[in-house]
Amino acid sequence: MNMDKVAIITAASRGMGAACANELAHRGYRVAIMSRSQAVVELAAELGGVGMTGSVTSADDLSALVDLTMNEFGRIDAVVNNTGHPPRGPLLEISDEDWHQGLDLVMLNVVRMSRIITPIMKKQQGGAIVNISTFAAFEPSSTFPVSATLRAALGGYTKLFADQFASHGIRMNSVLPGFIDSYSTDETIQATIPMGRYGKVSEIAQTVAFLLSSDAAYITGQNIRVDGGLTRSI
């Protein structure tokens, strides 16, 4: 158990974020969670943690979340950078505004949180960060053009961050989910998955918990696919 450990999880009111919060709380972490939905405050209360409404696109909200966590628990051992879905559409019809929105949502959220959290983890001489990305980061899908493009950049950032702060005991990895059961099931898509089913949010959460744990102490800078065999590259 991790009775003295504290984890931040963003976009945690439902789906993979809520599953991560539940899994980490079950493993003994004290959790601090944020989402744009008021439901996150109720979930935090259920899990014996703290919660606040806010957006990962706001540096002020991210700072407020870190301040809330430090004031309540005095330390931060783990961060799960989860987020919502960026805009979609035909590649050449995506507006500049939507590209910028996507950048804020799936790339700069991690950059901004890293700036805030790294000094705290350096002072503590350790910490672990997991970013929730997508299978399409390295096998781009035209269904998710903004996500696929910008999360490829997130993969690069993950490696650069991991290299720079490994000597401080700080690790960063990204989890690349395939099609997960928090989405509506599509039989055509399901047929393309070698395991023949959508993944469970609990399976993503368990992978995240492993990567945050001491069992993964020698894993950093990696992009871990959790996709039921969907992607083909090796």
Image (spheres, grey):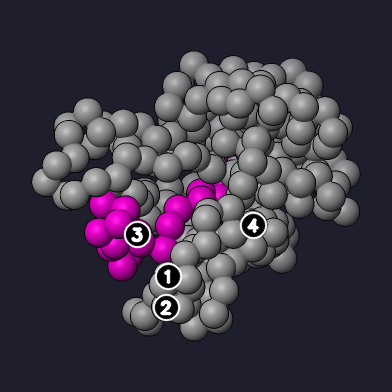
Q: Is residue 146 left or right of residue 127?
A: left
Q: Nearer the viewer, residue 182 or 126?
A: 182
Where does the magenta region start and end?
122-145
| Distance of label 3 from label 1 (alpha carbons) | 18 Å
Residue denoted by label 4: 201
Asked whether residue 98 is in view, the answer is: yes
Q: Nearer the viewer, residue 189 or 77?
A: 189
Return the mark for residue 137: 3
Do the CB atoms of the residues marked 4 and 3 lie less than 8 Å apart?
no
Q: Indicate the amino acid at tag 1.
A: Ile
Mark in front: 3 vs 2: 2
Vertical placement of residue 111 versus 26, above or below: above
Do the CB atoms of the residues marked 1 and 2 lie less than 8 Å apart?
yes
Q: Is residue 28 left or right of residue 232?
A: right
**Does the magenta run of residues contain 208?**
no
Q: Indicate the amino acid at tag 4.
A: Val
Residue denoted by label 1: 189
Mark in front: 3 vs 1: 1
Seen as rendered, the residue at the extreme left is 92
| Distance of label 3 from label 2 (alpha carbons) | 18 Å
| Distance of label 4 from label 3 (alpha carbons) | 19 Å
**Does the magenta run of residues contain 132?**
yes
Q: Quadrant of residue 188?
A: bottom left
Q: SS for tag 2?
A: loop
Q: Indicate the amino acid at tag 3.
A: Ala
Asked whether residue 170 is in view, the answer is: no
Local crowd at mark 1 within 10 Å, few (<14), some, or many (≥20)?
few
